Every structure is written in C-alpha cells, then in structure tokens.
Image (spheres, grey):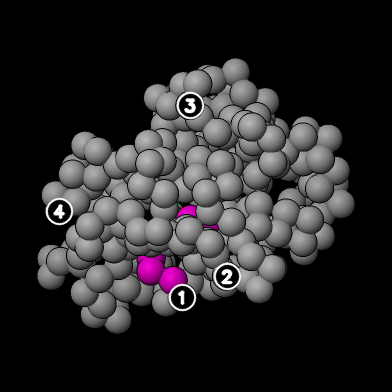
C-alpha cells in the first residue's frame, strides 16, 4: 500500500459511518494514512452518496452489485488500495473479496461471532441481542471474506445492554462507538499497523473499552488516540 491508501467506501444506507471516517481523516489532516477516493452504493440516492457529493468525492450507484468483475475493474481502475464496507447490505462477490483479501473491512453492530450472518443487519441485530437477554453488545470491525460477518476480527468495543433498552436505544449506543472506532481502524489498516497474516490471524487486533484503551496497537500511533471521544463514548 502506498504512503496514503486510496479508500473506496461501500454503503447502502445513511452513511453515518462514512461521515465519521471523512471527519476523522480531515481532523488528522496531513497525518492521515487513508484518503476516501470513491463511494459506491447499492442504492441510487442513498445518504452515503449525498455525503460523498457534499465533499466532492466521486460517487456511484452500482447498477449490478452482484457483478464482481465489473466491481473489481472499477476498484482497480480507481487505484483503490482498501475497501471499507459501511452499512453495505449486499454480499461482496468472491472475485472481489479474493482480490482484496486483507484489504477489505466491515463493521458490524454486535460482538461477532454472535448475532451476525445473513439477514442480520440493522434493527434485527439489536432485537436479537435483546431477545437473547445478552448483557453486553458492541461493535466489531473485521476483515471481509466470502461469508457474511465471518472474516477475521480486527477490533471490538463492548457496550452495555440496559434493562429498559429497545432496539433503537441499543443501536444508538452502539453507533456512537462505531463512529469512534471505525475511522481509527481504517487509518491503522491503511498504515499497515494492522494486517492479516497468511494464516488468517490479525496482527495488531485490539479491543477498546473499559479494559484500558487500545490493545496491541503501537502506543506511539497518535492517529489512533481516542481522547475525548473515548470518554464520551464510554459514558453510557
Ligand atoms: C451500522 O450500524 C453498521 O454497523 C451496520 O449498518 C449501520 C450503518 O449505518 N453495518 P450508517 O449507514 O453508517 O449510518
């Protein structure tokens, strides 16, 4: 990967994670190791495409999200080094996940490997957590392989589940930590501080939360510092 990785963000929905990534990279300024160069959506008129347009970033609705060859050609033509799924609801074709092995991330709004897999997205995830009576949920960032939500785990951040929660309240609490976590992981993977080994182990995987900040990430990686956002996100 180059000095600054060109990132494609794939999103189907509102794109609040895309926004968090754009904002964080802007805050890092010259220190950022990633650059969002392309936003792709499985839906025309998605909030994510709006946000890309507002920043002057190239954006496109995919006519055929299941056409892997076309998607791969587009990514390669655009010089994309890292693919970031942010609320992308389609399965990424195998030809693309293979080509971008170790260079494609997803965020899931629960602690994988629980509460993931086909059909587990949006409110359904949070409802399943509540129905199971789980007391902890959270956000998981993982490398993407050819199955939904099964790739190697890169980072997790737990949040509590409260007695009075409904799916919406829980999703808001989780989304808050997603926004703090995902942009930093994107930058760290772009910087190759985190990488997928040949044996599918993640070098530099970490956990954030009440256990004392970020594990196994170089402590001098100031791009990762959580600062005030960490405090805010942890004041549940
Ligand atoms: C997030 O909860 C993310 O974890 C999930 O879909 C949601 C996307 O939200 N994969 P947004 O489009 O980024 O606002």
Question: Residue 81 appears in which quarter of the rendering?
Answer: top right
Mark found first going from the N terminus, 3 or 4: 3
| Crowdedness near tag 4: few (<14), some (14–19) or many (≥20) residues, C-alpha within 10 Å | few
Choose mark 4 or mark 2, whichever is in front.
Answer: 2
Quick one: SS at disc 1? loop
Q: Give the spatial CA distance, label 1 vs label 4.
A: 24 Å
Give the left or right position of residue 173, taking residue 32 as reference. left
| Bounds of the magenta segment | 106-112
| Residue sitting at x 33%, y 54% | 214
Q: Give the spatial CA distance, label 2 vs label 3.
A: 27 Å
- Say the numbered circle drawn on residue 125: none
Which residue is labeled 1 in the image?
A: 113
Give the left or right position of residue 19, taking residue 229 as reference. right
Which residue is labeled 2 in the image?
A: 201
Give the left or right position of residue 117, taking residue 76 as reference. left
Q: Give the spatial CA distance, label 3 vs label 4.
A: 31 Å
Which residue is labeled 4 in the image?
A: 236
Mark found first going from the N terminus, 1 or 4: 1
Which residue is labeled 3 in the image?
A: 31
Choose mark 3 or mark 1, whichever is in front.
Answer: 3
| Residue sitting at x 77%, y 41% | 75
Residue 147 visible (yes or no): no
Q: Quadrant of the N terminus?
A: top right
Residue 42 visible (yes or no): yes
């Amino acid at each position: 990967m180059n000095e600054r990785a060109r990132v494609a963000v794939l999103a189907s929905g509102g794109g609040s994670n895309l926004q968090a990534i754009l904002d964080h990279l802007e805050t890092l300024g010259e220190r950022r190791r990633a650059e969002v160069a392309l936003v792709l959506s499985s839906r025309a008129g998605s909030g994510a495409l709006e946000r890309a347009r507002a920043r002057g970033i190239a954006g496109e609705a995919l006519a055929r999200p299941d056409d892997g060859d076309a998607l791969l050609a587009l990514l390669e033509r655009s010089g994309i080094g890292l693919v970031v799924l942010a609320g992308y609801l389609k399965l990424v074709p195998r030809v693309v996940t293979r080509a971008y092995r170790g260079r494609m991330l997803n965020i899931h709004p629960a602690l994988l490997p629980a509460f993931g897999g086909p059909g587990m997205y949006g409110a359904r995830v949070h409802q399943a957590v509540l129905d199971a009576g789980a007391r902890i949920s959270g956000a998981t960032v993982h490398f993407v392989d050819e199955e939904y939500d099964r790739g190697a785990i890169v980072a997790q951040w737990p949040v509590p589940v409260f007695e009075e929660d409904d799916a919406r309240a829980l999703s808001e609490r989780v989304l808050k930590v997603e926004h703090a976590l995902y942009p930093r992981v994107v930058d760290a993977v772009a910087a190759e501080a985190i990488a997928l080994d040949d044996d599918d182990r993640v070098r530099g995987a970490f956990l954030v939360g009440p256990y004392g900040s970020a594990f196994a990430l170089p402590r001098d990686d100031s791009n990762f510092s959580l600062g005030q956002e960490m405090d805010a996100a942890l004041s549940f």
